[in-house]
Amino acid sequence: MKKISILIVLSVILYSCGSMMPGLPTSTSGEIVKHKYYTLSYYEKYEQAEWVAYEIDSSFILTKMKRTNNFKEDTAVHTGSATLADYRGSGYDRGHLCPAADMHLNKQAMKESFYMSNMSPQKPEFNRGGWRELEELVRDWTLNEGRLYIVTGPVLKDSLTVIGDNEVAVPKYYYKVLFDYTEPEIKGIAFLLPNALIDKPLSEYAVPIDSVEEVTGIDFFYELRYGLEKQIEKENNYSDWDK
């Protein structure tokens, strides 16, 4: 009986404390697909990932693996991913969720970044403008902080415009959630941007992670201990990051 009681107490302590590691976000209706360098939740209804989650450090950025531009269907998605034909003639870019420039580590990482499951329809002025600027900012912050956990995705809702035979939804908004889980400064921040020309400083699109959870229905850090999760998901301290 004493052994059972001790196990119960330990279980309660572990549950209440939670983890320092972020774990994967929740999935609303997606298929979890694990590649070597990132994991995604593929939402068949919208023919794209609802989120892509990965970690990077300076080695992913400073290693200069050549960009391939070799877009391919993701055969790991059981229902089939979107295809190149879906985007052809649509007027939309194949916007990376996990950027190719975050995957310079080796050939495998670069290859995975061009799976069609990692693409989402973005307006050219957004993909080549504000979204690219945000990706570059995150890489700068990665070099500053040493290592970051990143979750990126579209805001998927009903009644969106679709493209291609597979009816790939065109999101109106995209988000990027960042978590620095290493000492001495553990912190989080998120960005929520419209799929349009970005003509304001990126700092104006910074929001608490809670705000992204509200619009997506995704719980990003539920595996963290409660106090830490609550703390970082309410933060929106852009100045703490932009050093």
Image (cartoon, helix red, strand yellow):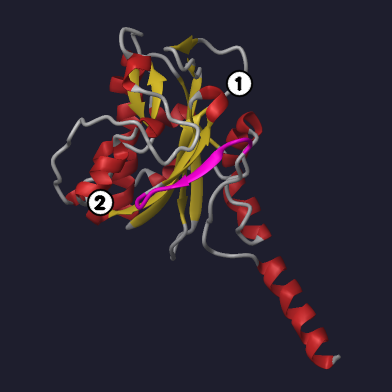
**Left or right of 71: which side holds 221?**
right
127 or 233: which is nearer to us? 127
Mark 1 nearby-residue class (10 Å; few <14, some 14–19, many ≥20): some
Query: Which mark is drawn over residue 157?
Result: 1
In reply to whether residue 32 is colored magenta, the answer given is yes
- Where does residue 86 sit, x and y in percent of width and height? 38, 16
Contact between marks 1 and 2 (CB within 8 A): the answer is: no
Instruction: Please report the residue visible at 53 percent of the width from the left and 56 percent of the height from the top.
Output: 23
**Left or right of 212: which side holds 122?**
left
Q: Amino acid at mark 2?
A: Phe
Q: Which residues are magenta?
A: 28-37
Please tell me whether residue 188 is drawn above or below residue 123 in the rendered image. below
Q: Is residue 199 visible?
A: no
Q: Is residue 8 visible?
A: yes
Q: Secondary structure at mark 2?
A: helix
The residues bearing labels 1 and 2 have C-alpha atoms spaced at a distance of: 33 Å
Please tell me whether residue 69 is drawn above or below residue 110 in the rendered image. above
Q: Amino acid at mark 1?
A: Lys
Between disc 1 and disc 2, whose residue precedes? Answer: 2
